[in-house]
Image: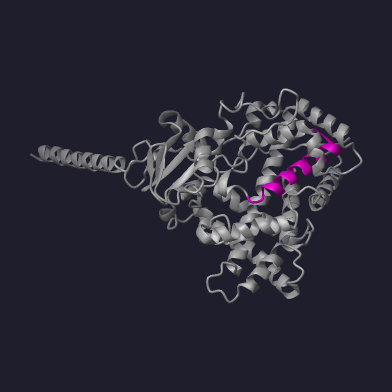
Amino acid sequence: MELTGLLASVLILLSCCYFIFSTWKTMYRKQGLPPGPTPLPLIGNLLNIKMGSMVNSFVKLSEQYGSVYTLYFGLNPIIVICGYEAVKEALIDQNDEFGARGKLPTIGQFTKGYGLSSANGERWKKMRTFTFKTLREFGLGKIGNEWKIQEEARCVVEEFRKSQGHPLNPSATFMEAFSSIICSIFFGDHYDYTDGRFKKLIFCTNEVLRIINSPWGQVHSIFPTLMSYVPGPHHKAVSLSEEMVDFFAEIVKSCQQTFDPSKPKHFVNCFLSKMEKEKDDPNTEFDMKNLLCTIHNLYIGATETLNTTLRHALLILLKYPEVEDKVHEEIDRVIGRDRMVNMEDKFNMPYTQAVIHEVQRFCDIAPFNVPHMVTKDTMFRGYHIPKGTNVYTLLFTVHRDATQFSTPYKFNPNHFLDENGQFKKNDAFMAYSVGKRSCPGEGVARMELFIFLITILQNFNLTSQMEFSEADVAPKLKGFVNVPIQYELSFIPR
């Protein structure tokens, strides 16, 4: 009788599990969402995603379910869009519907919707309009206004000369240089690379991005509510961000004491002027919280991503010395070795432009893009996507789209050259994203990459004691940001 009772209990339990699973499956299928793997109660599609290899997991699912499919992060549906045509349709053709920022749990728990990157609605519109306008007013990203970047590139060259050809990792120097540029844009000051507070700011930035990219950060993105109660390093991103903002707040306070509304000299001055004009408006978005969070957002976006891109570029040139030789030849022919490069030179340097674009395409620094969110109930390719649903547009699949690039998995500058060897644009190049949520600092970033890479190659030959394979230079696709392998190289004066 005991055995019969046990079997009966097991059968009842199995029947209940089957009923719950069937009910769950039927319930989620009725929503009209795109197809996708069946989620499990509570954990969703966690078992379909390999932590530390998220991009590959998403790409494999697209091979099974198509260019638009649904995943569940816990109980929440996530729409994944893959390939050039589908991403273009969402971010350009239906940019109003897909124009909101999706949830960024690791950063969002600090910014709480303030600033630029994680804001939505009127706050985002005002912060973005102000940011674009202010950057344009100071000529940043415009030809003829590259002197700050040129000066910092000279400093980098001098730092590398000090190494006297000994192997080094250039990451710290690049990070210091790009940090100094963005701080000069915000505050009008150049920071010495040895400044202790400046080094602490850089350390905090590196750590925040490391946490976001780690398995802890990835799980936090999937289970934000649950992980808010689970101890772990993902919580440290908040305290690190607070340290960064404390540094910014101290400088802003100093700017307030010397501020002349009639002569704004930098980004913070312009924001303070706007705060003063709208101080009596109870609905103003120009307050100290938005200022500090906007600086925080832009600083993170303008430093480590450029550092990572340039390290990828040097690694690729070490692997393919014939590419470096061609860039050297173009530099010597167009600029020479005595004068500083300027942005006018890019029109006479099609091969170098093609190399920079191909580095960004091939390395896919942000393979997932930053999450988007639909602003209203939306029909997309025959599927119903409810308002507020997070959307991941996989830029990796755009940059690996065989209909747009002839050798999508190989480094090939010819992707951006026409039959006459002239630079050609490609609409499938989305390194800065596209649409309403494209990178606000794209103009400055393009300028920095061009001037830094050329200034380095104008002065040095690159060598390394390490041997690199194609697998070494290929993107690792471990998390939200693609970082290159650790390596050292020597800068040999030309």
Q: Is residue 273 left or right of residue 40?
A: right
At horizontal 63% and vertical 53% (from top left) the residue drawn is: 300
Region rendered in magenta? 440-462
Assign the C terminus to one quadrant of the image: top right
At horizontal 90% and vertical 42% (from top left) the residue drawn is: 339
The answer to which of 327 and 494 lies nearer the viewer is 327
Q: Is residue 42 left or right of residue 150?
A: left
Where's residue 286, x and y in %?
60, 68
Determine whether 291 is above or below 358 in the image.
below
Is 261 within the magenta?
A: no
Where's residue 150, x and y in %?
82, 49
Q: Is residue 294 left or right of residue 167?
A: left
Q: Is residue 83 visible?
A: no
Which scheme is used to colour this image of the protein?
Answer: one colour
Secondary structure mainly formed by the magenta segment: helix
Where's residue 206, x and y in %?
64, 51
Looking at this view, name the residue that lies furthest to the left. 1
